[in-house]
Image (spheres, helix red, strand yellow):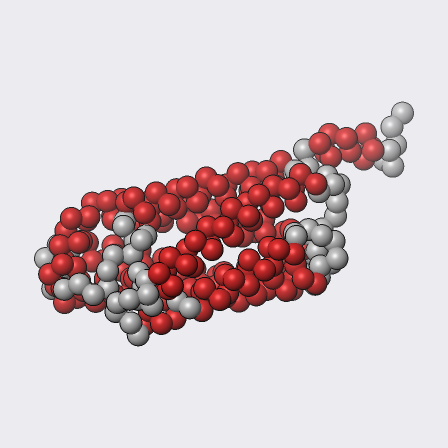
Amino acid sequence: MTTAGTAPAAIAPSSTRNRKTDLWICWWSIPIFYNVFGLIFVALTRVMPPPRPDITTAQIVEFFQDHSLTIRIGFALLMAVIGFTGLANGLIAYQMKRMSVSPVFAYAYIAALAVGAIPGCLFAAFAFLAATFRPDRDPQLVAMLYDLGLLSFVGSLGCFATQCMVLALAIFLDHNGIFPKWLAYISIWMIVTEILAAPVWVFQSGTLAWNGAISFWLGTAIFVGWEISMITLLYRAIKNQAADEQVQD
């Protein structure tokens, strides 16, 4: 005869075996999303690498005419999949809550990303979609949308500096070894490169313009390294996590 007190023990093994399924679903969404992200921003919309800032209005209009269809397809696809970033960011925040630091760090990480999401990603999509939506739009307005989209996309990278600062501090203060300390140092480099994107609001050519070696290419290279490291370390963190571990609220 089974009592109420022994029932949980009978189902615990099955529950424990399936405990990480949700975490693996979240993890797999990350490499899939960033591959789709690369397809959208590189192959379809031509936002990465950014087209030149020092071109004429006629050249800007020609750019949108030449790529109108793929820009609309690409950014329409973005609107359908952008929400999957929530799974990636939520998984990182979850691992931060496993650290020996206050859960405030995890909440601050999510909040900082929320602040940067619109200017750092979606605004470029809205601007480019508006520029291609009406082919007969005034060329000067098209040029303005071109500038707004690319200045926002590259120039607002500083919005993400707080995200990286919060993550780096949490790693340095953590005694549970969830992430290695070298990830914190890469995150500090992310802060540096994101702040270095600020001059795009001033320069229209050269290394500090929105397509420059410092403002764009250096930051992009470090971001790619950071993202690959994060995906790998999240995999290890999930794999090494005890299935019955309780995470603080």
| Figure check: 219 above or below 32 | below
- Picture residue at 74% right of the left edge, 48% below the top: 246
Q: Is residue 58 visible?
A: yes
In this rendering, position of residue 166 left or right of residue 222:
right
Position in image of residue 127 (x %, y %): 27, 60
Q: Nearest the camera: 178 or 78?
A: 178
- Residue drawn at the location 41% of the way across and 55% of the way down: 220
> As drawn, is 94 to the left or to the right of 216?
right
Question: How far across and how far down the image is residue 207, in percent?
Answer: 33, 65
| Residue 167 is at least partly visible in this image | no
Q: Tell me residue 139's x, y (percent).
A: 12, 63
Name the quarter where the C terminus is drawn: bottom right
In the figure, residue 217 lies in which quadrant? bottom left
Residue at 36 percent of width and 48 percent of height: 78
Question: Residue 7: which quarter of the image?
Answer: top right
Residue occupying image coordinates x 38% and y 63% = 214
Q: Quadrant of the N terminus?
A: top right
